[in-house]
Image (cartoon, coloured by chain):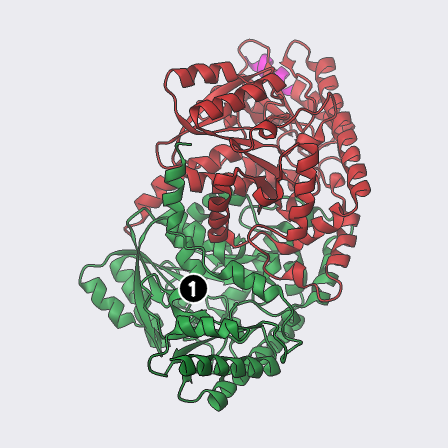
Chain colours: A red, B green
Amino acid sequence: MTSRPEFAARTAGMRPSKLRELVAAAARPSAGDVSGPTLLSLGGGLPPAEAFPARAVAEAAERALAGAAGAALQYSATEGDPDLLDLVGADLAGRLRLPDPTGRLLVTTGSQQALDLIGKVLLDPGDVAVVESPAYVGALRALAGYQPRIVEVPVDDDGMDTELLAGRLRAGLRPKLCYLVPNFSNPSGRTLTARRRTRLAQLAARYGFLIVEDDPYGQLRFAGADLPPVAADAAEQVVYLGSFSKLVAPGLRVGYLAAPRWLHRALTVAKQATDLNSAALSQRLLVELLADPDWFAGHLAGLRDLYRVRAEALTGAVADRLAGRLATPMPDGGMFVWASVQTPGIDALALARAAMRRAVSVVPGNEFSLADGYPRHLRLSFSMLGPAGLVAAVDRLGDAFDDLTASG
Amino acid sequence: MTSRPEFAARTAGMRPSKLRELVAAAARPSAGDVSGPTLLSLGGGLPPAEAFPARAVAEAAERALAGAAGAALQYSATEGDPDLLDLVGADLAGRLRLPDPTGRLLVTTGSQQALDLIGKVLLDPGDVAVVESPAYVGALRALAGYQPRIVEVPVDDDGMDTELLAGRLRAGLRPKLCYLVPNFSNPSGRTLTARRRTRLAQLAARYGFLIVEDDPYGQLRFAGADLPPVAADAAEQVVYLGSFSKLVAPGLRVGYLAAPRWLHRALTVAKQATDLNSAALSQRLLVELLADPDWFAGHLAGLRDLYRVRAEALTGAVADRLAGRLATPMPDGGMFVWASVQTPGIDALALARAAMRRAVSVVPGNEFSLADGYPRHLRLSFSMLGPAGLVAAVDRLGDAFDDLTASG
């Protein structure tokens, strides 16, 4: 086949990362057994099954599929189910102060598809794409398919370092887009400060690039006050990505984007060419669920409690068991702690391997950087295990440290 | 924004066709009222609501969401739900004689996504993509995003003219791929003969191109005997696309592909980068439905009866009312009749517009060709209306003819 070398080159940039293996590992039973050799996962970024409102979804399915069920089973408009667009638009107008969002919305097959569509519409090979660093691996993978030059801008305690970006821009860097997760980022757990949000929007306006504001965790804040999104005062500079994967269930595969007016039609045309529309049934289930705002608010409050308790359990267990060996800054929400190894001479990848031998999974930091900039970091997810499981997992991580120290 | 000209150029090739408008038109009530001014649709290629097994889907949802419901609500493996892969693999091994298909499968967000992934992995700007002509507009749109040179090879009564393709290949044409719908094609209604299937596979092997065999309607045959797919004896030359959109419901957005071994991993990596996985809930519903083969066989038999009755009603009404003015060859399955205008001086686009004024929608033939090669053809879909509605729609089409003749 003449075509084999070409497609091999094309997909070489898409690093097939650990997600599939992590999904497989996460599918094994773990949380119920904290003493045996069953794998305990601090690795995957999956919501736990106990976070899924299975009964509410089942009742929504019953309602959505009663009678003719046409809307739930038929093709939908490419933009999305009109009722869902209204509900999401009203939410964004209120919660995020986005001006008149409904006409700028597009329902996507998870936020991952939004990243793919943005790359498809905007990126030519060699274009510059700025990403916060460390970055969500799925974003690196989605963008890589379009062969941009990816420039990583480091995150500190205040989120992506916008002054460092400003310096690069003054020195001539001309990105097409800048990707970041402003709230409790995956993997850094950091939140971009209000001051930096304003600054980033100013830079985008001055230098003419698009901000891709990926916000899957914004409603999972369990400490501190909500911050306005970057898009709030810069709707024409920002494409805002939301998702129901972490708020209801990933199995629905429903996310959405709110795009600048100049970009919305191109993204919609690209979406139509890509998969016509996202699953109508999933969209109708969400319409049924969101139509009861009290239920949804209560459900979100429950999720925030669940993740707060788990974040405290994980960071508390590390403080008790691994003080001086692992630093785990407490995030204000989300699912992730960006841990740094403090013990001299211990490499994060070696630690991750030693941990796997002790039947606990973690993700080494270099997974989240094309530049391999994080040899001393681990991403720890506190989403999959209950408090007792998290304590047991940290104990095993301590054993892994001991194994490395003893053998070193 | 520096990026606007680029994305405008990028999406110019993706012709946003009439599908969205047709979906909107189809959403209006029509079948119940055959005398008033309500639009009667011969336009869209949508299954009718009465073809949806809404009650069976509702019962499947109840089972899939009972208990922990983890598999239905969680992320799934990129390749697809393992149980669904087993069921589809067994079906393809039996029905299509595809050797050992399960490891070559990838569940996609409808067949449309398979087309997008194939383009993404294989096509560079300027590459040649052969398509049967007339062709499914969604395929033209999906491929166009990757900026190939699209070469149309005409369809005759026996499907795509493989000898014409052979001549082009001998003359030096070197396509990366060749796209066609072998069974009851959209829009031509034609079926590729067994002899041409073998010939096409030979050409693909000799000249080193990939056949994209898109088969959404193969199980909707209501006349004649099943033919083996092109892929049956050429699994390494063909990517076979199947879909549950026409067999169960489009709202699930579940299709699948069976790829050559050399291509499967690249498509899977591209799928992971594009939307991680297709909706797990939809996949679990299909597992529940397909686990009862008797139910599924009965459901398909019902669909075949439904479409046969409608195809006969449409072609019969045209023979009664429009003999000498419109020729409508009866297809052996599927949803479409490729009608040709016989009256001299009447253009299909003018007829489609006149029909819309008489409140009946049809799609002019040039929608299905980048070369505008079908100014005398219309695609008539018999899927959306019952027999009485089809007769009424043909009456109105007759009125549209009269309007044009009177004014001409």
Residue segment shown in magenta = A399-408
Q: Position of residue B198 (x, y in %)?
A: 33, 71
Question: What secondary structure do most residues of the magenta stretch adopt?
Answer: helix
Q: Quadrant of the C terminus of chain B?
A: bottom left
SS under mark 1: loop
Q: Quadrant of the N terminus of chain B?
A: top left
Look at label 1 and name its amino acid: Tyr
Left or right of B245? Residue A11 is left
- Chain bearing mark 1: B
In the image, farthest residue toward the front: B407
Q: Is residue B150 above or below residue B43?
A: above
Q: Is residue B7 magenta?
A: no
Left or right of A333? Residue B391 is left
Residue A375 seen: no
Q: Is residue A406 magenta?
A: yes
Residue ID at (37%, 31%):
A127
For residue A207, what is the image quadrant?
top left
Residue ID at (34%, 40%):
A9
In the image, farthest residue toward the left: B171
Residue ID at (55%, 79%):
B393
Residue denoted by label 1: B136
Q: Is residue A317 above or below residue B138?
A: above
Task: Work out whether residue A223 or residue B93 is closer to the camera in this orientation and state it.
Answer: A223
Task: Work out whether residue A183 or residue A36 is closer to the camera in this orientation and state it.
Answer: A183
